[in-house]
Every structure is written in C-alpha cells, then in structure tokens.
C-alpha cells in the first residue's frame, strides 16, 4: 500500500520540469505565442528526445508503454511551465484511441508512427460532450460531414481523430478534400485549437464499440486537463508566495500581513487535496477502469473550481502587477481557464457524474 | 501507486471482519460522544482491547494490547468498524491526549496508575487548557498554582471543557513560574475533579445543549508530585498532545459517511412530488461536495502512506483540519437546504428529520472550525510552516511576558 508517485514517476516529472525550466521559460513562451504559434519547437524536440511522443504507446509498437498516471505527471509539469506543447490530444488521446479501438492492422500502421513523431494528430471529441453553434458530425458511406468545434492540438496536425455524434471514432487526413480548418483563438495562446468543417471527407473508422472507447478517451482527456490545471495552480501559488516575500509596503514585506498570508494558505489548502484526486483518477484509469469515468468527472470539475479560485487569488496577491502583461501571470490564469472549459465545464461534468451514479436517469 | 494490501494485511482485514460479525450484537447502541461511557461501552472497550482493536500499540503492562506500531493495521481496523457502522474503541480526551502524553513524558508510577483505567473507560478525563483570556494565544493562560506546604494551590478559571461534569480527573495547564517568559512558566498537572474548591458550570452553546463547561478553581490543593514533566515545561508537554487532537478532527471516513447520509437524504426527501436529487441546483451542489470528499479521501491516503514510510506529511497533512472541518460543515449546510423549511425543525418537533441532527451538526461543526486551533490559526500554520512565509511580527509594546 503506497499512495503516491513511484520513483520513476518522480524522475519523469523532474526531468520534464527541468527541461522546461531550461528550454521553455516564460520569455520563450512569449516569443512563441507572439509569433502566432502554440508549439515551441525546441521544447517539442527535447520532449521527443525523452520519448514523450510514444509515452503511452506500447513498447511492442515502439513506445514507452507507460500509463495515465505517468501522462498526468507530465501534464502537470507542462501546466506548471505554461508550455506551448501539444500534449493531451496528440501524444495521449490519439494513441489511446488506437489502443482502445484500433484493429491490429491499424495499431501496427499508426502507433509506431505516432511514437516516432512521424504523424501528428489533432483530436476532435468536444461534440460528444456539448454541441454548440450547430456542431455535429455524421458518417455516411465512410465519409464524414459536419462541424467539429474545439479540436485539440491542431497546429502542425497532419491527421485528425474525430468522433461522430454516435461516438464512433475516425481518422481523417488533414489535407483531404472537404476539410476546412477554422482557426479558433481562445484566451490561452499556449494551446492550438481549431474547428473542422467537414464535407464528405473520406475517413478510416476505428472499431465500432458503441462509443465506449470514445467515452474512455474523454475521461483520459479530463484527467489530463485536470493535471495540467494542477501544475498551473502550483506555479501560481509559488509565484504569489515569492512575490509576497519580496514586495514591501508600509515598511514590511506584504507576505508578513495576515490578510496576504491567509490568501496564500487558502490557495495551498484547496490545491493540495487536488493533487491526490488527480493522481487517484489517473491511477483508476490504469488500474480500476470501472471507477475511471466518475473519478475523471470529479477531478475535472473539482480542479476546474479550485483552479479558478487560485488563478484569481494568486493574481490578487500580486496586486496591480498581477493584472499587467509585464509579469506574465495571466498565461497561467488563462491556461487554467482553458482547462476548466474544455471537454465539459464543472456543471456539465457534475451532471454526467450524477448520471454515471444513477442519481438521475438519462433523458430519452 | 500501489493500493493493494499484501496477504498479511488482507488476512488481518478478514480477521477484523470476522470479529465484527461475531461480536457486533455486543456493541453499544448510539455511542454518545463527550459523555461518560455507558456500562455496555466499557464492556465493549475491554473486549476490543483484548483483541487489539483499540489501544493496540499501548504496552501490555499499561493495559494495552502491546502490538508493534503498524499504521496500516490501525487504518484497517478504523475502516472496517466505520464500514460496518459499529463503534470502535473509545476516543475521549483521556485516551487520545493524556495517554500518549504519559507514555512519552510521564513517570513510571503515573503510567502504571493512570493508563490502564483510562483505556478501559473506568477513569474519564477532561482537559483544562483554554481560558476566557487565553484561546488561540493559549500560552498567555493565567490560572495560577503557587506552592504552599508541598502542594500546588490553584486559582483561576478554565473554559471549553467537555466532559467536565462526568470526568473523574483533569489534565490541566497552570502558571507556576510567574516570572518566566510566557511559554516557560507553565506546568502540566493532573488531579481529581473531586478535589475541594472545583466548581463546574455547564456552558450552553448555540446548539441549545451544554456540550462544554466552565471550571472555576478556588484554592484547589494538589500534591506536588501530580505534575507531568518538570515545572515550567507544561507548554512543551501539552504540545506533544495537541497534534493528536488535530488529527482526530480530520477523519476521512467520517466525511464519507456524512456524504453518504446526505445522498440518501436527497434521494428520499420529496418536494412538490420530486425527489430533491432531481432538482438540478441541489444536485449540482451535491456533486461539488462529492468531488471534494473524494479529494480529501485520497489526501488522507497520501498522508497515511507518508506515515507508513516514516516521512513527514508535509502540506497534505497541514491542511487536513482546516479543509475537513469546513467540508463537514458544508455537507450539513446542504442537507439543511435540501430539507428546506423542514430543515428548521429541531427540539424533537413533529416532522423533524434525523432527530434534528443535521442542524445540530451544522452548528456544532462551526464550533469545530473554531475549536482545536481556529481556521485563522490553521492558516497561520499553513502559511508559516507549509509555505515558509514570515511570522507575524510582534507589536513593540507587547513583548514577551
């Protein structure tokens, strides 16, 4: 009985964090996003070197064969650094979809190329959670038609994993005729998000399992967004505490005032149990699959709520400086905001948790 | 992450379950908190000690079971009793606070005399710490003990003393060294509540009950050897036990059980012909609390793991009292709201639910947020010890007394 990260997981987290401190400090993040990109080439290259493209790809297909808890600690490190790195969709959800619902031939075709970085996926699942502005995708004769919004990790994607409205998963080629990419600009410039308008696009279907794989992939996505938010919240608390220890007013550092200390204590007190919840949800995904959908909902909703409070409070601790672009604190604020809304905000996800537990019946 | 138990622990769990199944008919009904244990409770307690399900690591010569410390086994016992809905061992202040203190700092004679009857439930203790003028700043306490003819002579007042009316004995902080700095002038005395000069007055709280008391001491004479530790060391003696109290206030099983009761309530109670859980606003609040309870549960497992490894609990441990007390309060608050106007019913009223316990808990849990180190003191501790933020500067005029 040992609730916590293994030594290997701690080392993985530390090596990703060290690499990002070196190659992806805030001024680099600024340079990347100011060049209208959400991909840091140097961070990507170094992370690929560590094998992160194949993090969850089984060793038989050239990957590291690691699990969701490993992916979650990486996501936390990326969130902590507000790293412009396409991770959750491209490096975890796409290969997981193939692992869960791909035929042997599909796995053999795609997984080694994902692990080597030879193919880059964007991932469109948001329509299975909420449909807005006429979004929805249907399939006829092996061709997809419709609108997928909030597709993850679009920049540099040469393929997309897309779900139709029944939860069936497909792979399409980004360059196919009938694929129109709609650039979406969110508050979080470190993530690359797009819409896809699809007009009779040829699609390679994964196994039809009645949407089970898609639901599992969504749970994975929620866990990773929660883990990212945890890392971003860690970073905001650390910055608030450090700033409060330097900034002087009324002849003393503001961190010696109880009003400020208590704001920091509240952030830490709310944040710390979140770490255990994220770890458990990721562990459940790997080891207790029947609990994973509910735990993913809990992690997503609770980290969303806690993240919002921390993002706001940490900004307030910085006073006027927190509100400026100079300090760059807003990169974390916006990252947390993104993590909260994608794949279901807290209210949406809590309703799903209620359905999962049979508190209420699913509407016909 | 390895949440499995090795075979030794699995068979221990089976053993605990077997004991509960075979003996649960002997368990006292409605184990009342903060009162003198009933005769059935004392019988139950002695049975549990004999089997090692309470007082497990206390040495046999002092009336315990004498097992080697094994945090996981203690945890399994707590889990199985909680899941079975059967009361575990007594958890009063004598057992939770005095016994560990005596084990660590008592004389051999004190250990032999007091630990066994305390564990058995035959001797009940109360705690004389807080005073009207010494709450969060406990070390400023003023109840004095001067020495006269080989006795301490105690004068002063204590407050927030639960079980004072039922207690046989008190462990009490008093100022013996008037000239010393405030933390160094305190001694930790133990004496009988039957000693002449002690008056106990019930302290009625907002719940309508007197869960606490005030104690007044007028020339209370106590033999000079009834001290734990040295004169002037009382603050440090007491601090060995305050940690135990804070641990008691953050039991994850208790939170989970309260949440399950709330879910049942919301599935059963109807308003306008709809179950409360069918109303989205209430259901959403329930979902929020459920996620928070899950986070605290896994936080507790993380703290447990660090204890097993002999590592400090760090931030995960420091935040337990603050977060768990607040969460318990919020669970009761939602239950009251789910009951709506019925949630007001109290005092055994017609239509009352669960004997008014949701309201009682809602009020009493506010007391727990304040007691045992207020939420504000907890935040000082978290920021100073957990985040290394500066300590509160002392006002120039105040100084050390």
Image (cartoon, coloured by chain):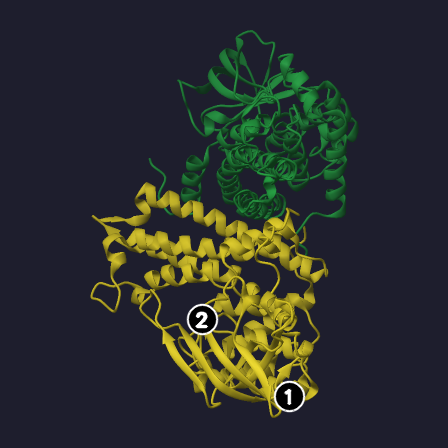
Chain colours: A green, B yellow
- Vertical placement of residue B319 versus A185, above or below: below
Subunit of label 1 = B
Q: Would residue A68 be visible to someone looking at this image?
A: yes
Secondary structure category for the residue under label 2: loop
Q: In terms of depth relative to the viewer, which is nearer, B41 or B229?
A: B229
- Residue tagged 2: B160
Q: Which of the chains bears the disc numbered 2?
A: B
Q: Are marks 2 and 1 on the same chain?
A: yes
Residue B292 pos. (x, y %) = 49, 48
Q: Residue at left 69%, top 68%?
A: B8
Q: Measured along the vertical axis of the image, is residue A142 above or below residue B74? A: above
Task: Give me the C-alpha separation between circle 2 and circle 1.
Answer: 26 Å
Q: Which residue is mark 1?
A: B225
Q: Quadrant of the N terminus of chain A?
A: bottom right
Residue B344 position, x and y percent, is 26, 58
Label 2 vs label 1, nearer the camera: 1
Number of numbered discs present?
2
């Amino acid at each position: 009985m040992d609730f916590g990260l293994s030594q290997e997981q701690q080392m993985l987290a530390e090596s990703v964090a060290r690499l990002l401190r070196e190659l992806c400090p805030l001024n680099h993040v600024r340079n990347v996003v100011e060049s209208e990109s959400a991909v840091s080439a140097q961070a990507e290259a170094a992370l690929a070197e560590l094998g992160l493209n194949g993090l969850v790809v089984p060793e038989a297909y050239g990957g590291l064969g690691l699990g969701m808890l490993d992916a979650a600690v990486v996501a936390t490190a990326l969130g902590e650094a507000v790293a412009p790195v396409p991770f959750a969709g491209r490096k975890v959800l796409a290969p997981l979809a193939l692992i869960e619902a791909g035929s042997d031939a599909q796995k053999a075709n795609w997984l080694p190329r994902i692990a080597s970085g030879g193919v880059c996926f964007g991932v469109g699942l948001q329509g299975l959670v909420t449909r807005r502005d006429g979004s929805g995708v249907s399939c006829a004769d092996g061709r997809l038609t419709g609108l997928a919004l909030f597709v993850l990790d679009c920049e540099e994607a040469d393929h997309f994993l897309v779900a139709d409205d029944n939860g069936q998963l497909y792979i399409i080629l980004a360059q196919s005729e009938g694929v129109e990419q709609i650039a979406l600009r969110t508050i979080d410039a470190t993530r690359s998000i797009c819409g896809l308008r699809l007009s009779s696009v040829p699609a390679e279907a994964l196994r039809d399992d009645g949407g089970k794989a898609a639901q599992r992939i969504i749970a994975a996505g929620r866990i990773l967004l929660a883990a990212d938010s945890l890392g971003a919240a860690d970073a905001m608390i650390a910055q608030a505490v450090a700033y409060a220890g330097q900034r002087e007013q009324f002849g003393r550092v503001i961190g010696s005032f109880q009003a400020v200390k208590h704001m920091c204590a509240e952030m830490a007190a709310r944040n710390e149990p979140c770490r255990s919840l994220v770890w458990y949800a990721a562990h459940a995904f790997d080891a207790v699959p029947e609990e994973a959908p509910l735990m993913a909902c809990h992690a997503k909703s609770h980290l969303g709520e806690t993240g919002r409070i921390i993002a706001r409070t940490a900004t307030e601790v910085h006073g006027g400086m927190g509100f400026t672009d100079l300090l760059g604190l807003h990169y974390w604020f916006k990252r947390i905001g993104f993590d909260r809304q994608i794949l279901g905000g807290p209210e949406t996800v809590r309703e799903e948790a209620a359905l999962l537990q049979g508190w209420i019946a699913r509407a016909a | 992450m390895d949440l499995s138990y090795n075979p030794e622990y699995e068979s221990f769990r089976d053993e605990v379950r077997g004991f509960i199944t075979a003996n649960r008919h002997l368990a006292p009904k409605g184990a009342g908190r903060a009162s003198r244990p009933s005769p059935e409770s004392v019988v139950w307690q002695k049975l549990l000690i004999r089997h090692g399900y309470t007082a497990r690591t206390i040495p046999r010569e002092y009336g315990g079971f004498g097992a080697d410390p094994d945090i996981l086994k203690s945890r399994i016992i707590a889990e199985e009793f909680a899941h079975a809905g059967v009361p575990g061992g007594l958890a009063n202040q004598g057992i939770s606070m005095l016994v560990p203190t005596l084990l660590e700092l008592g004389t051999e004679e004190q250990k032999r005399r007091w630990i066994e009857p305390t564990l058995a439930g035959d001797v009940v203790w109360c705690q004389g710490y807080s005073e009207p003028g010494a709450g969060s700043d406990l070390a400023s306490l003023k109840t004095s003990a001067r020495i006269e003819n080989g006795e301490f002579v105690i004068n002063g007042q204590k407050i927030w003393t639960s079980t004072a009316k039922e207690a046989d004995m008190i462990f009490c902080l008093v100022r013996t060294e008037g000239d010393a700095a405030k933390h160094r002038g305190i001694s930790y005395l133990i004496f009988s509540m039957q000693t002449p000069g002690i008056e106990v007055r019930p302290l009625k709280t907002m719940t309508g009950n007197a869960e606490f008391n005030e104690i007044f001491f007028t020339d209370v004479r106590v033999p000079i050897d009834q001290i734990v530790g040295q004169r002037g060391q009382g603050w440090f003696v007491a601090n060995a036990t305050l940690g135990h109290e804070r641990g008691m206030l953050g039991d994850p099983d208790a939170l989970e059980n309260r949440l399950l009761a709330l879910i049942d309530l919301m599935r059963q109670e109807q308003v306008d012909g709809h179950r409360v859980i069918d109303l989205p606003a209430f259901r959403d609040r329930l979902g929020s609390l459920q996620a928070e309870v899950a986070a605290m549960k896994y936080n507790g497992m993380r703290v447990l793991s660090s204890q097993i490894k002999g590592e400090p609990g760090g931030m995960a441990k420091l935040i337990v009292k603050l977060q768990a007390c607040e969460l318990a309060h919020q669970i009761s608050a939602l239950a009251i709201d789910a009951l709506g106007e019925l949630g007001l019913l109290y005092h055994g009223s017609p239509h009352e639910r669960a004997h008014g316990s949701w309201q009682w808990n809602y009020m009493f849990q506010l007391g727990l947020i304040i007691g045992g180190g207020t939420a504000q003191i907890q935040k000082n501790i978290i920021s100073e010890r957990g985040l290394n933020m500066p300590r509160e500067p002392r006002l120039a005029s105040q100084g050390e007394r």
